[in-house]
Image: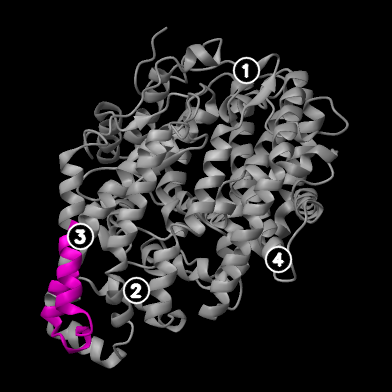
Amino acid sequence: MRHIPGQGPLPAPEAAGAEAAAKAPSWRLDDLYDGMGSPALKDDLDAAEAEAVALESGFKGRLANLSGDGLADLIVRLEGLEEKLGRAYSYAQLLHSADRSDTKVGRFYQGIQERVNAISTRLLFVNLELNRIPDAEMDAKVASSPALARYKPYLRDVRAFRPHQLDDEIERVLHEKSVTGRAAWVRLFDETLAGLRFAYDGQDLTTAEIFDKMTDRDRDVRRRAGEAIALTLKRNLPLFARVTNTLAKDKAIEDGWRRFDRPISRRNLANQVEDGVVDALILAVKDAYPRLSHRYYALKARWMGLDKLEYWDRNAPLPEDADTRHGWDDAKVVVLDAYRGFSPKLASIVERFFDGGWIDADPRPGKDSGAFCHSTVPSVHPYVLMNYQGRNRDIMTLAHELGHGVHQSLAADQGLFMSGTPLTLAETASVFGEQLTFRKLLNAERDPKRRRLLLAGKIEDMLNTVVRQIAFCEFERRVHAARAEGELTLDDLAAHWMAVQEESLGPAFAFRDDYEVFWSYIPHFIHSPFYVYAYAFGDCLVNSLYAVFEQEPEGFEERYLAMLKAGGTLRHKELLAPFGLDASDPAFWNKGIGVVEGFIDRLEKELDDVAV
């Protein structure tokens, strides 16, 4: 029966993943540029270069002497220039993400990286000189100029790094050589990972295809998929270990120059969150491992009739799950319904992503195996990439990435310099969108069996977001600490990985030796060290936020939209204050963790009722 928006549960599922994904769209990037040879792209880069030369020659060495209005004029021009560079770089990056196997696209992407880097090198003087202006003088400039006062959040964030700024020439060298240094290693990792093929039943499967089999209902299929992944990763392990060692050492060197206390401190500063707040989050989640992951996976093992789970059982379908898939059109309806039920304003933004060709969900060889929403620049719109396989988890991923898109769209009015949020807050709208979609499905579901499956699926997603990401962060903390003592061997990396997995997942698992290589495919370790705790931060934050919504729905939508529109202009304390929440309060994290615990309580009760 055709699903009617707003009525009833998810429609009857389809039988096969390939059929479910058949209509998944590919994006259209012509809102950025109409091709790699686009005259508009060349014009933007030429104009940006000319403006960079003009700014350098006209302002370098003079910022301290500018009036407030003069400084505001410089920032406005700089923002316009950076918008052109951001547009060009976004286009190249999105093309490369859609097909990392195309050598022409790879060459184009590298060329854009180098051109953008060369142009932006001329502009390094701006932040360096802004940070040398004494606080009293900067305050006076801001007070004298309404135009400059608008950029007060931008100045706040730039100047937050003042204690860690190096001499101008060192900053220039670090920036200029990043293309052949860190960025080159990251590209090597990405292209290697995208090019991996996994031998399975006479086929060479992509990363997305083989990991999809890790959620197959047939345990033997999952086992053979896990073994195929382990075998391929092991063959490439020396390269991945070399990348990891090199980038960890590179980070340690620069962190030392910049006088950061700990490897994670630079990420915390960029996230505009205090070290103590992050420490409290990590400690709260680790203390909750027995009440969360240990407890749930023991329940799952009993449900599946197993004495112990293997690593390929972690995301396995439960016995009552028919492992069926849902078509793209059904996923679209479900997500739109969920957003519309909370806010018609948000739903109208989400609808533009579907109608405008801003989503690439078609799984195909060479494509990035993950999922993301790229904000591009405020004058265009974000783009979503994912690999839609038709599972409930894919629907949640769609809702998640569209939450990012909504957030970025609403914050665009703040302009390029102030629309972006730190990672800790960037996950707010995405996780909230997931929560809306899940609650919509759960509340509408009348079949007890499917309701249990939805509940278990959400618990697993939350464990993946909270417990698993904190375990990842703990792995990074151990690796970076150990790297300070010398290069890590394959055995060292394996030992750290297995230790945090055993600690976080608990005694329900019998960990096989071949699982020790699974650290090597996780891109966040390479792209953005210590990024991962932001997922747990966002999930616990949204759990607390959603509890406020349930208790006090009146006026919540208006406050929530205002929070998203603020972009990066406000810090977490200011953003959460209208909701009566404070992330610096240790009880805040336990409140968020308690939501996950409550879902496990509910699932246990439903299973006990069935047993009786």
Rendered image: mark on residue 483: 4
Front in this rendered view, residue 113 or 314: 113
Tell whether position 417 is magenta: no
Q: Mark 3 points at which residue?
A: 49
Q: What element carries label 2?
A: helix
Q: Distance between the residues labelled 1 and 2?
A: 49 Å
Q: Name the residue under label 2.
A: 158
Q: Residue furthest right?
A: 307
- The answer to whether residue 165 is seen in the rendering is yes
CB under 8 Å between callouts 3 and 4? no
Q: What element carries label 3?
A: helix
Between disc 2 and disc 4, whose residue precedes? Answer: 2
Front in this rendered view, residue 113 or 266: 113
Determine the image quadrant of residue 159. bottom left
**Which amino acid type is shown beneath numbered disc 2?**
Val
Residue 476 left/right relative to 302: left
Q: Which residue is drawn at 30% across and 54% down?
A: 115
Per the rendered image, the range of residues in magenta is: 48-75
Front in this rendered view, residue 467 or 28: 28
Q: Residue at x 17, y 54 (%)?
A: 46
Q: How far apart are marks 3 and 4 (CA)?
A: 39 Å
Residue 424 left/right relative to 465: left
